[in-house]
Amino acid sequence: MAVAHLYGLNPIPSEAPRAPRIFVEPEDFVSIAELARSISGCARACIRLEDAETGEMRLTFFPDLPGVRDLPAALLPDGRGQARLSGPSLRQEMQAAGLPDLAFWAGFTLRSMDGRMLGVLCLMDEVPRELSETALAQLRHLAEVLSRGIGMAASTIRATARQSLGLIEDLAELEEGAASPAVTGLLRYAAGRVPTSGEAMAMRIAGLADMSGGLLMLTPTAKDILYTHGFRLANPRAVEVGEPVDEPVVLHLGDGTAVPAAAPEFHTMARLRIGEVHHDIARDDETERFAFRITGSDDPWVMLDNGLEQGWPEMAAEIIKRTRDATFDYVRMHMIHNREAAHAPGEFVYDLYGMGWAVRGTPDHAEARGADGVWRAFDAAHIRHDAPRDFSALAAFAAIPDLADRIGADVHEWSKRIAAGSEVTPVFG
């Protein structure tokens, strides 16, 4: 069984490309837009898709509304999934955008299965309308169907690209040079994977990509080529998602009900050993996010901020920080008992790279003093009486309130050094 040791490995440099995110076109969902119009009775619908990280936006009206390039900000959901529909400038904003005088507007937020904002399904009319609760429920469900359809279409695009890439890679094993690195890199990008450094360079030489802010960005020429053959992509960027709660936006109507995002589906792809503890590492093929849990447990998967583009050491370091109090462990290991410092009986003085503190008392009645000279009580009831070093390390956080922020970078590098001794084993099947 293959085992990859992490000794000496470094994370991918900041200039390394990141896996791309794939978007489809609103025109691909004309049937859903027409169904939304039929349910609501509205004269017009629109679908607006946007990558919030790159700002790339696609907007289509059904039927077409020439001259309108984007929707006013007041008609778009904010970070909470709601629109700000009031204010004296709303009419002016709508006129400036080229929209007709509207008496009704409704917007339903679209989200991916991992909770990422995809865009909004909108309905509009120049005459006042009232939608029943039944119609609203149908439109909410339709927005969910549209959200899932966008994700499925993107998955189909990735699957097609991966099939083409697999064919080229098999040919390359039989005949070296059967395909240029620029071609394989472009297909790898379309498949949602990170091109190798050689492929990325070949893409840049061929005019298919540029580097910007550490990201490999496709040029308009490359996008045109992919678009012609059915690949529709947005620029690459990684995101951290929370657990949003969205309500449909309805102008002149009340609030709606949120449609919860479906949970990612993780599949174990590796086992990571850190010390004597084994963790399963899993990946969700749809969102391309990674997660971990203790091997053999049925605990919920814990999402990771880092992935393969950052490297296994970064992933292992993150797991260390998530499964133990790495900052406390760092202080406990690196603090020095300063026995030469002046102190009163019963007091103990410690130092951590020039940051000093004193502690006195017992876990039942503990006090710590920092640079300001003020003794402050702190809770140490969970510390055993036979663990004085734990007691003194905990005192550091009471004496130096911003200690965690001040040593955060050092703790991260220390975690990476611990992670360098880890082992990762692929899991097949």
Image: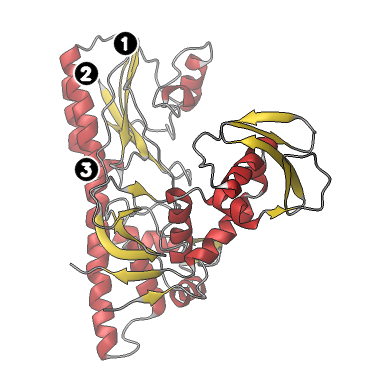
For the point 25% across and 90% down, the residue is 174
Residues at discs 3 and 2 in contact (Cβ within 8 Å): no
Question: Mark 3 vs mark 2: which is more N-terminal?
Answer: 2
Ranked by sequence position, the earlier of labels 3 and 1 is: 3
The amino acid pointed to by label 1 is Leu
Please say whether residue 68 is visible from this viewpoint. yes
Residue depicted at x 48% and y 26%: 73
Q: Residue furthest bottom?
A: 175
Q: Relative to residue 333, is residue 165 drawn left or right?
A: left
Q: Is residue 62 above or below residue 57?
A: above
Q: What secondary structure is marked by label 1? A: loop
Label 3, label 1: how far apart the Cα atoms are:
27 Å
The amino acid at mark 3 is: Gly
Of all residues shown, which one is farthest toward the right? 342
**123 and 326: which one is in front?**
326
For label 1, the residue is 253
Amino acid marked by disc 2: Leu
Q: Which residue is mark 2?
A: 136
Left/right placement of residue 262 relative to residue 354 reads: left
- Helix, strand or loop status at disc 2: helix
Measure how far apart labels 3 and 2 are at the Cα level. 20 Å
Discs 1, 2 touching: Cβ within 8 Å:
yes
How packed is label 3: few (under 14 Cα within 10 Å), some, or many (20 or more)?
A: some
Residue 155 image point, x, y percent? 24, 54
Residue 180, percent across and down? 38, 81
Q: Position of residue 369 (x, y in %)?
A: 73, 35
Q: Quickly name the residue at label 3.
A: 149
Cα–Cα gap, marks 1 and 2: 10 Å
Location of the N terminus (image quadrant): bottom left
Q: Quadrant of residue 131?
A: top left
Crowd class of label 2 (few under 14; some 14 to 19; many from 20; radius 10 Å): some
